Image (cartoon, grey):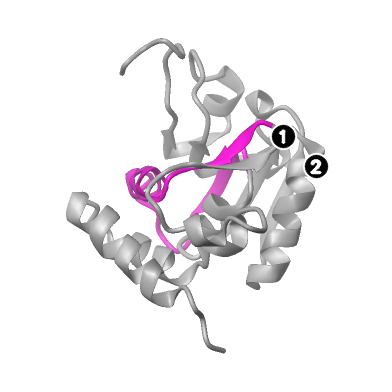
Amino acid sequence: MNDPFETRRKAMVNDQIRRRGVSDERVLKAMEEVARHLFVPQGMEEEAYQDRPLPIGSGQTISQPYIVAVMTALLRLTPSDAVLEIGCGSGYQAAILSRIAASVISVERIEDVAEHAKENFRRAGVTGIRIIIGDGTEGCPEGAPYDAILVTAAAPFVPQPLLDQLADGGRLVAPVGDTDSST
């Protein structure tokens, strides 16, 4: 199948991600393979490979590609890892994670957003991701322990239930701080 965005996707990886220091080849390969334009709202496909967040509805955004790459690389994933993602959004980050790890569970608090993510997975041919609708601060205890947990939205602190659900030696990546903080 001819992908009209393949050239843009490869340029995104080389120009926005690799050149800015992300060197994990598994992350770079996953980002070359996952069609980001299938995870943005209809009519925004032309903007999908720009290095900026884009609105996806319900007051939510798809993260900029560089941030997706950095956060994924920081997890240091292995092919046998079980991953918990907090904040599924459009599903793009989960699709990237699923190319590298053994399993991905994603918790999304907004039901409509979760339904759109499921549709995006279908359109992109992504399988094996389980979406839970619920409070991300509680994680997903029934799938624990997790080798890696990724929180996609800023929080003032890491909720204790997430720390409790990490496996021994597990990694957690989360933007922590208040919304007025520059760090």
Q: Which mark is residue 18?
A: none
Whether residue 36 is visible: yes
Is residue 136 in the magenta section? no
Residue ID at (36%, 60%): 27
Tag 1 near tag 2, CB within 8 Å: yes
- Position of residue 34 measured from the top left corner of the image (x, y, whole percent): 50, 67
Whether residue 102 is visible: no
Q: Relative to 30, is 137 above or below?
A: above
- Position of residue 156 measured from the top left corner of the image (x, y, whole percent): 49, 13
Residue ID at (48%, 61%): 80
Residue wearing tag 2: 112
Instruction: Please state if 135 lies on the left or on the right of 150 as rendered.
Output: right
Q: Nearer the viewer, residue 53 or 117?
A: 53
Residue wearing tag 1: 58
Element assignment for label 1: loop
- Position of residue 4 measured from the top left corner of the image (x, y, whole percent): 49, 78
Picture quadrant where residue 119 is located? bottom right
Q: Which residues are magenta?
A: 59-88
Q: Amino acid at mark 1?
A: Ser
Q: Relative to 94, is 55 above or below?
A: above
Of labels 1 and 2, earlier in sequence is 1
> Which is more foreground, mark 1 or mark 2?
1
Q: Residues within 10 Å of mark 2 (few under 14, many from 20)?
A: some
Q: Amino acid at mark 2?
A: Asp
Element assignment for label 2: helix
- Position of residue 178 measured from the top left corner of the image (x, y, whole percent): 45, 11
Residue ID at (25%, 64%): 14
